[in-house]
Image: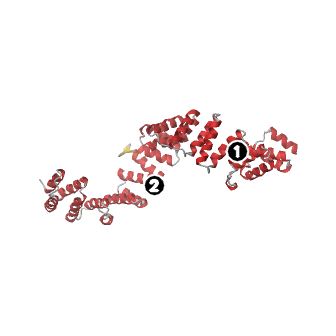
Amino acid sequence: MSYSEQLLDAIEKHDFSQNNILLKKALDSDSSELLAALAENLTDMGFSDMAKDVYRALIAKNPEEDLFKVYLAEILLNDGQDDDALSLLYSIDENSDSYLESLLVQADYYQSLGLLETAQAKLQEAHELAPKEDAIIFGLAELAYSTGKNELALHYYQDLATRQKHFGEINLRERIFASLAKLGRYEEASEIIKQYGQDFIDIDRRYEAGLVLLSTKDYKKAIEYLTGVLEQANDYVNAYPLLAQAYEANGDNEKALETAQTGLTYNEYDETLYALIGRVAANSTKYELAVDMLKKGLTFAPENMDLRVQLSNLYLYLKKDEENLHLFQEIDDENLEPQARWNIAVSLYHLEKYQESRKEFLLAYPNLQNNAEFLKDMIRLFNIDGERGVLKDLLQKYLKLIPDDEEMLDLYDELV
């Protein structure tokens, strides 16, 4: 039995008393082949200090064998001895048989430091040396994917997928789908789902599948995937708004409300869920629920003007003009959106506060002058005021948008 074998046997028996003696004898007596196997075993067993000694001896005995430098450098990097490791790696000539392995170790190292451009350059050089090496192609794909270079990642993943379905534990179809989704190529992504979606295991990919299917209006399939996500992890909070939207779009308002309300139990700060409940409840004539949820949403997000305007629209529909005006009392003038000013103007008009209403209409006009409904509301006010010149201009603008409105045509004829 060689000294290398005796050392490994002793370690396996947890007898460490002769480690240094056996290691010295192995280094003095055993062949390079035996020492290479010893170093590999010591590394696997976690005895990195002894493995480093063996590789240093191998490098001294075999100065032309650069692969030992690569293996030693890997250990040194794992032990935090970066400078020594890099010196070894950079000492390997580009004509060496081990230059490719050196580049791959360097790429891993620079990627671990977050120096992604340098890591990509190392991998790209390796790819040029070995263009058919799938491990390098996969490395380039993963690096591109992690840095948002989705077009490049897609190219590499599609190349790999022509030869295999998985690379290690990674489902290449999932990666192709995710890259397409990030590029906004939803129709192509949905085709991947239809063909291979049953193989998707990663919960994030299943969630993204639901998002894509919702975007392509395949609501039933979207519901299937998003429901599956929540069955797998009921605290996956981002899935609730999408699932509720899918139910709403599919015409199932009750399930939409139920899903959104469940989502709020996991994240009561989700503004999109308050907006959705307000919208769906109002469409289902559950006005009290709609008002309550929109008001609650505003307690968590008072700066959310979309929620405020949504509640304002509902107040107008319910003819609650005082409540509507109160909604904007504490909002600075410069923060009022055109739609908010329009709503305020309408409530003031209903309350016969015509001068104040006129002011709000005029402030909203530059942004809403091509909105026929806005112009019609404004015309009604200026008809009361009797400002024939302004009224005529408004009617002309309105009739360009809605030329067959009999009421407005008759009013225009009266002016001319």
Q: Secondary structure at mark 2?
A: loop
Look at 38% across and 42% down and name the residue there.
165
Q: Residues within 10 Å of mark 1 (few under 14, many from 20)?
A: many
Look at discs 2 and 1 and give the one toward the viewer.
1
Residue 395 in view, yes or no: no
Q: Residues within 10 Å of mark 2 (few under 14, many from 20)?
A: few
Residue extending farthest to the left is 1
Q: Disc 1 marks which amino acid?
A: Asn
In the rendered image, which residue does mark 1 sit on?
A: 324
In the image, residue 282 sits, relative to residue 353, either above or below, namely above
Q: Disc 2 marks which amino acid?
A: Thr
Q: Which mark is residue 37?
A: none
* Left or right of 384 in this view: 118: left
Q: Which mark is residue 147?
A: 2
Q: Position of residue 342 (x, y in %)?
A: 72, 47
Q: Position of residue 275 (x, y in %)?
A: 60, 43
* Left or right of 331 in this view: 123: left
Of label 2 and label 1, which has the lower sequence position? 2
Q: Nearer the viewer, residue 233 or 125?
A: 233
Look at 82% across and 41% down and name the residue there.
409
Report which quarter residue 94 is drawn in: bottom left
Q: Quadrant of the C terminus?
A: top right
Q: Nearer the viewer, residue 74 or 19?
A: 19
Mark 2 vs mark 1, CA separation in Å? 47 Å
